[in-house]
Image (spheres, grey):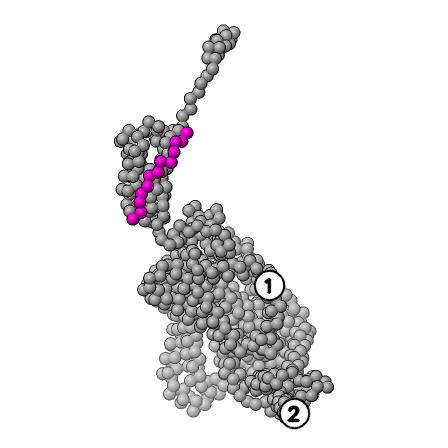
C-alpha cells in the first residue's frame, strides 16, 4: 500500500532530534564499545542483510542499532589519541631506529622496545574501533539500498484501476459498515445509564466548551480585524507590515483553539467509542490543513490591513488564488482523514484506492488551475517596473512542474499506478505550501530585521548602511537551509536518510591526523568570532577613550588602531586553530612547497603588504595629509594593507599601491606642520615705480589673516619680462590647505590697490610696421578702378 510520505510528525521528530543531538552524542560517547556484543550484532545483521527477507520496519530497527555502534566506534577512535601522541613523541626523542647491521645501546634499545609495545597496546582499541566503524558503515549502506529498492518497486507497482466499476461495491460496503459501527457506538453510549449520568454531570462544562469553540471558530476573523483596526500604526512602514503578518497568524491559532474546545466537549460527552475516537484523532490535523490553506491564500493573494500581496495579480486572479488555496487545504485534510482511517480500520488496498481516487482527481485539477494562475505572463507590473529575470524563471519552472504533475497524477491513478500518483500530487501541494510559508517568513523576518537595525542606527530606511542589503541574502539562505530537510521528507526521504547525512556532517572527514567535523568547525568559528569581537572592542575603546587623551595626531592614532586590528585578528586565528585541536604540522611541507610558487605569483601583493606595514610604522604619510605622488595630488583618505586611497581635488578617488610610496618620491605638504608657502606672481608696466609696487605688495601680503608672521614676507623683483616687470609675493601660511583661497584673496586686493595708485597691469602688445605703404595703396586703387 502507499507509503505515508506526508507525516508531519516525522518532521517534528527530526527537528527535535537535531536539537538534542549534541547532548545525545555526548552521552553515547561516554559509553564504551562492547566488542563482544558488537561482534554478535554484526554477524546477525550480516545474515539478515544476506537473506533480505526482513520487513522494512525490522530493517529500520536494525539500522538504528548499527548506527549506535558506529557512533561509539567513532568516539573510541579519538579517545586514546593523547596517549598515542605522547608515546610517539617519546620514540621520536630516542632518535631514528638503527639501520640493519647497526648496533644500538642496550638501554636505548630496551626502552625503544618498551615504548613500541606500549604504542601497539594503545593503538589496538583504536584500530579495532576503525574496523568496527567501517563494518557498521558498510552494513548501514546495504540496508539503505534494500529499503530504497523496495520503495522504488512499490512506487511502480501496477495495481487495480479505480475507474473499474467492479471495485466500487467493495469500497462502498467498507465505508457503510464503518459508519454503521460508529452509529452503533453512539447508540450504546446513549443507552448506558452510567454514561448518561456522567454526561449530565459534565453537561455545563460541555455546553460552555461548545459555545466557546463555536465562537472562536466563527467570530475569530471579525475580532481579529477589529483588534487590528484599533491598534496604532507604527511609524515605520516595515514595522506595520510585520505587525500585520504576525497578527494574521491568529486566523489559524484562534480557530484551532475553538476546534480543541469542541473536541474536548465531545470527549467529555463520552458518546464516542473506539471508531469515533479514530475520527477525533484526525480532526486537529484536518482543521490545521483547512485553516492553514485559507490563511496562506489570504496572505499570499489578498492585501489585508496594509500588507501588500506577495504575487502581483489582477483582482479576479487573486480571488481565484484564494479559493484554490482554500480548496487545496480541504483536499489535503480529506487525504489525511483517509490515511488515518486506513491505518486504524480494516481497509483493503482496493477500497482505499477507490476512495482516494476522487480526492486525487480534484487535487490534480486544482494543481493545474493553480499552475495556470502562477504563469508569469499573468503577473501585473507597476508602470516602469521591470520583471526580475531570475524570479520569472523560477516561477515559470514551478508553474510548469505544477501543471505537469496535476495532469500526470490522476492519469497514473486511473491506470493503476496509484502509489506513484499520490507520490506526485500531494507532495506537490505541500511543496507549494512550504514555498508560500517560506515567502511569508522571509518577509516577516526581513521586515523585523530592518526595523530593528534602523532603530538601532537611528536612521530612516533610505539612509541605512549598505551592509543592510546583506540581510535579505542571509535570511533567504537560512530559510532555504531549514526548508531543505522538510522538502526532502515531503518527497519521500526517510528520516534515517536525513540522519545519515547529518551523521556524516557531524562525524566530518579526515585530513591526515585531523578530523574536520561540525564541532571542530563550530569551535573554530566561535573562538575566532570571540577573538575578533574582542579586537573590535579594544579598538573601539582605544579610539573613543584612550587615544583622544594622548597628544598623538590623527595619523598616529590611526596607525595604532590599524596595528591593533592586525595583531588581534592574527591572535584570534591562532587561538581558534589551537582550540579546535587542529594539528597543522602535517601541512607544513605542503605549505612550504606552495609558498615558493605563490611567492612568485603574489610578489607584488606581498610587496604592497610589507610597504603598508612600513607606512604604518614610519608614518611618512598619514590620513588627512596633502600629498603628491606621481601625477596625482590630493588628500590621503585611507591607508590599508595593500593600497592607499587619495581624494584628488577633482573629487576622484585614486588607489595607489603602497609600494609606490616606499620606492618612489612622495611630496607631503603637511607632514611635519600645516605651514606652507604661497607664491603670487604679479606683472606691472615699465613706467611703474618699482619701490612703490614692492611696498604695496608687502602691505597686501602682511594684511592677510592666514599669513604666519613668524616667518618673513618677501617680495621679489624677478626681472624684466617681454611685456612687464615681474614681481612675486612669497609668504608662509598658517595652513597650507588654504593656499588657493589666499592666492585668490591677494590677487583681488592687488588689483584694487593698483587701481587706486594708478599702477597699470600690462597685457601683451605688438607693434606692426608695414613697408612700402605707398605702393600698396596704389595697387589697391588700381584694382578698384578695374572692378
Q: Residue at x 57, y 60 (%)?
A: 602
**Residue 134: x percent and y percent?**
65, 82
**Residue 200: x percent and y percent?**
38, 86
Q: Is residue 387 left or right of residue 136?
A: left
Whether residue 303 can be seen here: no
Q: Is residue 675 magenta?
A: no
Other residues around mark 2 within 10 Å, as few (<14) / some (14–19) / many (≥20): few
Q: Secondary structure at mark 1?
A: helix
Q: Is residue 764 left or right of residue 414?
A: left
Ranked by sequence position, the earlier of labels 2 and 1 is 2
Q: Secondary structure at mark 2?
A: helix
User: Which mark is in front, 2 or 1?
Assistant: 2
Quadrant for residue 147, please give it. Answer: bottom right
**Residue 674: x percent and y percent?**
35, 51
* Label 1 sits on residue: 598
Q: Which mark is residue 106?
A: 2
Query: Which region is colored magenta?
Result: 710-722
Q: Is residue 286 above or below residue 749?
A: below
Quadrant for residue 761, please give it. Answer: top left
Q: CA distance from mark 2 to mark 1?
A: 48 Å
Q: Which mark is residue 93?
A: none
Q: Is residue 325 left or right of residue 549?
A: right
Q: Residue at x 36, y 83 (%)?
A: 204
Q: Residue at x 49, y 56 (%)?
A: 662
Q: Nearer the viewer, residue 167 or 550?
A: 550
Quarter of the image for the N terminus: give it: bottom right
Amino acid at each position: 500500500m502507499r507509503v505515508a510520505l506526508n507525516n508531519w510528525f516525522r518532521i517534528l521528530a527530526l527537528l527535535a532530534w537535531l536539537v538534542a543531538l549534541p547532548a545525545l552524542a555526548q552521552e553515547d560517547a561516554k559509553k564504551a564499545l562492547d566488542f563482544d556484543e558488537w561482534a554478535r550484532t554484526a554477524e546477525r545483521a550480516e545474515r539478515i542483510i544476506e537473506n533480505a527477507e526482513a520487513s522494512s520496519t525490522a530493517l529500520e530497527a536494525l539500522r538504528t542499532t548499527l548506527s549506535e555502534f558506529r557512533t561509539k566506534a567513532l568516539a573510541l577512535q579519538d579517545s586514546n589519541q593523547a596517549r598515542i601522541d605522547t608515546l610517539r613523541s617519546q620514540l621520536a626523542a630516542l632518535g631514528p631506529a638503527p639501520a640493519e647491521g647497526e648496533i644500538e645501546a642496550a638501554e636505548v634499545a630496551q626502552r625503544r622496545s618498551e615504548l613500541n609495545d606500549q604504542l601497539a597496546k594503545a593503538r589496538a582499541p583504536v584500530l579495532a574501533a576503525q574496523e568496527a566503524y567501517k563494518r557498521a558503515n558498510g552494513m548501514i549502506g546495504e540496508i539503505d539500498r534494500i529499503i530504497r529498492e523496495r520503495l522504488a518497486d512499490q512506487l511502480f507497482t501496477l495495481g487495480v484501476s479505480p475507474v473499474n466499476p467492479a471495485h466500487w461495491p467493495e469500497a462502498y460496503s467498507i465505508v457503510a459498515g464503518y459508519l454503521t459501527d460508529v452509529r452503533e457506538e453512539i447508540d450504546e453510549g446513549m443507552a448506558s445509564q452510567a454514561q448518561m449520568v456522567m454526561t449530565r454531570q459534565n453537561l455545563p462544562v460541555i455546553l460552555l466548551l461548545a459555545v466557546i469553540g463555536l465562537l472562536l471558530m466563527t467570530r475569530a476573523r471579525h475580532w481579529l480585524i477589529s483588534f487590528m483596526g484599533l491598534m496604532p500604526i507604527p511609524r515605520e512602514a516595515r514595522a506595520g507590515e510585520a505587525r500585520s503578518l504576525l497578527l494574521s497568524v491568529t486566523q489559524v491559532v484562534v480557530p484551532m483553539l475553538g476546534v480543541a474546545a469542541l473536541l474536548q466537549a465531545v470527549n467529555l460527552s463520552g458518546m464516542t467509542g473506539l471508531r469515533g475516537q479514530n475520527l477525533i484523532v484526525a480532526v486537529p490535523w484536518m482543521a490545521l490543513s483547512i485553516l492553514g490553506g485559507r490563511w496562506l491564500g489570504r496572505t499570499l493573494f489578498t492585501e489585508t490591513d496594509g500588507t501588500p500581496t506577495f504575487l502581483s495579480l489582477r483582482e479576479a486572479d487573486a480571488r481565484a488564488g484564494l479559493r484554490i488555496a482554500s480548496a487545496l487545504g480541504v483536499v489535503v485534510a480529506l487525504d489525511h482523514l483517509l490515511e488515518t482511517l486506513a491505518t486504524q480500520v480494516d481497509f483493503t488496498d482496493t477500497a482505499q484506492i477507490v476512495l482516494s481516487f476522487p480526492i486525487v482527481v480534484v487535487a490534480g485539477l486544482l494543481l493545474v488551475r493553480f499552475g495556470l494562475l502562477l504563469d508569469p505572463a499573468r503577473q501585473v507590473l507597476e508602470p516602469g517596473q521591470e520583471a526580475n529575470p531570475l524570479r520569472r524563471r523560477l516561477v515559470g519552472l514551478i508553474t510548469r512542474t505544477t501543471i505537469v504533475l496535476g495532469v500526470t497524477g490522476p492519469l497514473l491513478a486511473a491506470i493503476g499506478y496509484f502509489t506513484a500518483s499520490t507520490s506526485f500530487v500531494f507532495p506537490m501541494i505541500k511543496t507549494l505550501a512550504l514555498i508560500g510559508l517560506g515567502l511569508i517568513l522571509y518577509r516577516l523576518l526581513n521586515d523585523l530585521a530592518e526595523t530593528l537595525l534602523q532603530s538601532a542606527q537611528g536612521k530612516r530606511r533610505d539612509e541605512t548602511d549598505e551592509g543592510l542589503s546583506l540581510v535579505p541574502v542571509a535570511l533567504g539562505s537560512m530559510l532555504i537551509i531549514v526548508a531543505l530537510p522538510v522538502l526532502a521528507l515531503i518527497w519521500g526521504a526517510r528520516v534515517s536518510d536525513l540522519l545519515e547525512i547529518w551523521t556524516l556532517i557531524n562525524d566530518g572527514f579526515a585530513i591526515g591526523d585531523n578530523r574536520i567535523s561540525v564541532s571542530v568547525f563550530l569551535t573554530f568559528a566561535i573562538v575566532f568570532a570571540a577573538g575578533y569581537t574582542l579586537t573590535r572592542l579594544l579598538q573601539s575603546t582605544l579610539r573613543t577613550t584612550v587615544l583622544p587623551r594622548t597628544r598623538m595626531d590623527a595619523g598616529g592614532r590611526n596607525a595604532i588602531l590599524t596595528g591593533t586590528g592586525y595583531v588581534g585578528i592574527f591572535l584570534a586565528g591562532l587561538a581558534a586553530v589551537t582550540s579546535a585541536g587542529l594539528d597543522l604540522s602535517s601541512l607544513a611541507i605542503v605549505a612550504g612547497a606552495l609558498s615558493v610558487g605563490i611567492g612568485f605569483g603574489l610578489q607584488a601583493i606581498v610587496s604592497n603588504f610589507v610597504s603598508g606595514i612600513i607606512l604604518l610604522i614610519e608614518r611618512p604619510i598619514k590620513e588627512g595629509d596633502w600629498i603628491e605622488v606621481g601625477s596625482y595630488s590630493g588628500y590621503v583618505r585611507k591607508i590599508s594593507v595593500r593600497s592607499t586611497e587619495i581624494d584628488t581635488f577633482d573629487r576622484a578617488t585614486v588607489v595607489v599601491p603602497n609600494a609606490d610610496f616606499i620606492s618612489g618620491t612622495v611630496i607631503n605638504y603637511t607632514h611635519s606642520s600645516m605651514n606652507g608657502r604661497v607664491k603670487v606672481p604679479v606683472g606691472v608696466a615699465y613706467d611703474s615705480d618699482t619701490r612703490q609696487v614692492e611696498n604695496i605688495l608687502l602691505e597686501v601680503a602682511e594684511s592677510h589673516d592666514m599669513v604666519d608672521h613668524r616667518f618673513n614676507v618677501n617680495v621679489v623683483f624677478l626681472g624684466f619680462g617681454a611685456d612687464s616687470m615681474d614681481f612675486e609675493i612669497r609668504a608662509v601660511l598658517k595652513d597650507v590647505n588654504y593656499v588657493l583661497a589666499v592666492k585668490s584673496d591677494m590677487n583681488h586686493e592687488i588689483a584694487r590697490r593698483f587701481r587706486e595708485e594708478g599702477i597699470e597691469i600690462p597685457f601683451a602688445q605688438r607693434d606692426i610696421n608695414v613697408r612700402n605703404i605707398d605702393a600698396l595703396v596704389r595697387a589697391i586703387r588700381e584694382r578698384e578702378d578695374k572692378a
